[in-house]
Image (spheres, rainbow, N blue to C red):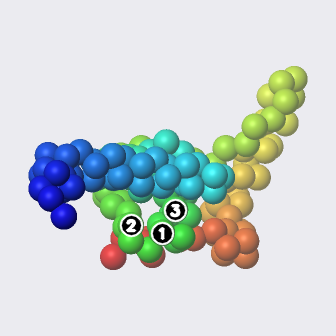
Amino acid sequence: MSNDDYLTLDQLNDRIAILEDNIRQLIEQAAAASGEQNEARIALQSGRVASFFDDISGNAKFAQTNKQYRLIIPSPVIDLEGTAFAIRKGYFYDDLQALDIMVENYVNTGKLKAGQAKYGLPNPADFTK
């Protein structure tokens, strides 16, 4: 075999860079195909970012299925999220107040947490260690 059959170090590095980019693109495509991914989570999995800020419930599901990632939950919270419902326009104010009272009661009595447990929604605190 002659020296003409070997690649230079620069040529090898170029080929490695191409392979790394191909792998990153495949990871992004696979993550996007999974359905529960958003651009930030895809960027994390492909190595384009080291961390990101996003909603806690979606991140808890992400950490539950991707054991190599952990959550950082600041205390006090940066952005307090409440429970919200999308409803049609046209409801009377009194009806909206009744719904608000029902939702507040649901949260305060623990029924919301019980529903989360019943339907398998992960506890974000489980993914902070």
- Which is more toward the observer, 28 or 66? 28
Residue visible at 54% across and 70% down?
65
Considering only order in the chain, which callout, 3 or 2, is on the residue closer to the N terminus? 3
Q: Residue 97 in the image: state x and y as whole percent.
A: 76, 38
Residue 26 seen from this side: yes
Disc 1 marks which amino acid?
Asn
Q: Tag 3: Cα neighbours inside 10 Å, few (<14), some, or many (≥20)?
A: many
The residue drawn where x is 16% and y is 51% is: 4
Q: Are marks 2 and 3 in contact (CB under 8 Å)?
A: yes
Please, what is the three-letter code of the amino acid marked with disc 3?
Phe
Label 2 CA crowd tier, 10 Å (few <14, some 14–19, many 20+) = some
Q: Position of 30 compared to 77: left or right?
A: right
Task: Give the residue pinned by disc 3.
Answer: 62
Q: Quadrant of the N terminus?
A: bottom left
The image position of residue 9, as x and y in percent, is 12, 52
Q: Position of residue 74 (x, y in %)?
A: 31, 57
- Residue carrying label 2: 69
From the top left corner, tell me how far across and down residue 13 is, in percent: 19, 50
Left or right of residue 10, residue 128 in this image = right
Crowding at dot 1, Cα within 10 Å, few <14 / some 14-19 / many 20+, comes out as few
Q: Is residue 9 left or right of residue 65?
A: left
Nearer to the camera, 129 or 42? 42
Residue at which label 1 appears: 66
Q: CA distance from mark 2 to mark 1?
A: 6 Å
Circle on res. 96 = none
**Quick check: marks 2 and 1 in contact, CB under 8 Å?**
yes
Q: Residue at x 23, y 45 (%)?
A: 14
Residue 114 seen from this side: no
Q: Which of the two residues, 16 or 86, is positioned nearer the viewer here?
A: 16
Q: Secondary structure at mark 1?
A: loop
